[in-house]
Amino acid sequence: MGELRKLANAKIEAEQEKLLALLPGEIEALKRKNAPKGLLRSGNTILGVVEICTDALDSLGKTVIEQYRWAIAQSLLASQSWVEELVSGAPERLQPLLERCTEHVTHVANFVGAPNLAAECAAKLEAKVAAISNDIALSLRSSFAERKRGLVRSLVGSVGGWLSKLIGVGKP
């Protein structure tokens, strides 16, 4: 299970690095878009950066769900406690991106002359991470429960098939 978790975390980290690399370019593109409209030093720019960061966090959250669900599906000995370890570790996977997003929001808020909005925007991003973490927890627990039910159904079906062959039910 440790191997599966390491592989999943490596894939998550790769996606996170990609998102971290894209953020500055997307923010600069937003600034270039807002500059000719006279909106460069406005709340629109701050809101745009928050939206870019929210989208990045959502994307990383989906990757965490996808990779951890993969690990659960591939594990031969997945247990509820192992799944809970994945759930409790999921917010750590989002933390570096959240920190970078908070830095970008703070920088842009200072740039536009509204440093008081930085804390409010950072709080929105933290609330988004909390919501994503909750979605991850629900998804992983659901995935484990589905897997467990599927294994039980498969086992019952196999035992029933073996028993019917063993006692000769249905033979002429």
Image (cartoon, rainbow, N blue to C red):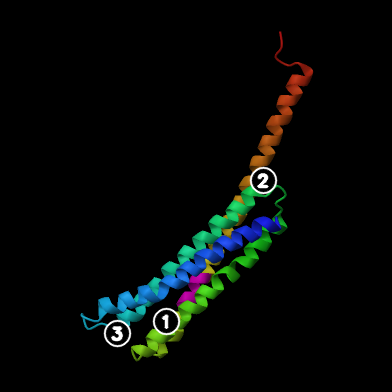
Mark 1 or mark 3, which is nearer the start of the sequence? 3
* Local SS, label 1: helix
Task: Please give the residue where the numbered disc 3 appears in the rendered image.
Answer: 42
Crowding at dot 1, Cα within 10 Å, few <14 / some 14-19 / many 20+, comes out as many
| Amino acid identity at mark 2 | Lys
Q: Which residues are magenta?
A: 124-129
> Residue 52 at what x, y percent from top left?
39, 72
In what quadrant of the picture does the N terminus appear?
bottom right
Instruction: Indicate the quadrant where residue 37 lies.
Output: bottom left
Task: Please give the residue where the numbered disc 2 appears in the rendered image.
Answer: 148
Q: CA distance from mark 1 to mark 2?
A: 43 Å
Give the main secondary structure, helix, strand or loop, of the magenta stretch: helix
* Local SS, label 3: loop
**Residue situated in front as seen by the camera: 144 or 108:** 108
Instruction: Indicate the quadrant where residue 158 lies.
Output: top right
Who's the residue at 62% across and 55% down the image? 141
27 left or right of 144 in image: left
Q: Which mark is residue 128?
A: none
Mark 2 or mark 1, which is nearer the start of the sequence? 1
> Residue 172 at what x, y percent from top left?
71, 8
Crowding at dot 2, Cα within 10 Å, few <14 / some 14-19 / many 20+, comes out as some
Instruction: Indicate the quadrant where residue 32 lies.
Output: bottom left
**Residue situated in front as seen by the camera: 144 or 96:** 96
157 left or right of 114 in image: right
> Residue 68 at what x, y percent from top left?
59, 57
Q: CA distance from mark 3 to mark 1?
A: 13 Å
**Residue situated in front as seen by the camera: 109 or 135:** 109
Mark 2 or mark 3, which is nearer the start of the sequence? 3
Q: Is residue 128 magenta?
A: yes
Q: Which mark is residue 105?
A: 1
